[in-house]
Image (spheres, rainbow, N blue to C red):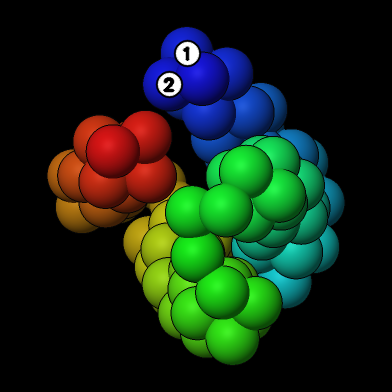
Amino acid sequence: MIVLRFFFIAALVKLLLVTDRPMLCAGLYTTLVALLGLFGLTLGFGSILWFLLFIVVRFGLSLLYFSLLSRFEGTGLWWVILIMGLFLGVV
C-alpha cells in the first residue's frame, strides 16, 4: 500500500509539472485515498463522519502541497517541498 501511494504521488507530481493544475492533482490524490479508506471503513475501522472529516483534511493538505510545488517550481525550495511531501504523503 505504501509503495502504491509513493508511485501515485510521484505520478501526480509529474502531472502537475505538465498541467500546472494543483486542484486536479489534489482531487486525484484524495480520490485514491478515499477509495483506499472505503476499504478500511467497510471492515469496521471507523464511522462515516470521521471518514468524511479525514477526506476533507486530506484534500486541504494535498491542495496545499501541490500548490506549493506549483508556486516554487524551478527553485531549490521545490526539492525540499517535494521530499517532505512524499514522505508525509506516504506515511
- 65 and 77: which one is in front? 65
SS state under label 2: helix
- Label 2 sits on residue: 2
Is 87 left or right of 7, judged from the image as shown?
left
CA neighbours of label 2 inside 10 A, class few (<14), some (14 to 19), many (20+): few
Residue 79 visible in rendering: no
Which image quarter: residue 15? top right
- Residue 59 on image: x %, y %: 58, 73
Q: Residue at x 63, y 28 (%)?
A: 8
Residue type for callout 2: Ile
Where is mark 1, residue-wise? 3
Label 1–label 2 contact, CB within 8 A: yes
Mark 1 secondary-structure assignment: helix
Q: Position of residue 83 (x, y in %)?
A: 25, 36
Q: Quadrant of the C terminus?
A: top left
Q: Is residue 79 left or right of residue 38?
A: left
Cα distance between the residues tagged 1 and 2: 4 Å
Instruction: Tell me the residue at 51%/20% (across/down).
Output: 1
Q: Indicate which disc residue 78 carries.
A: none
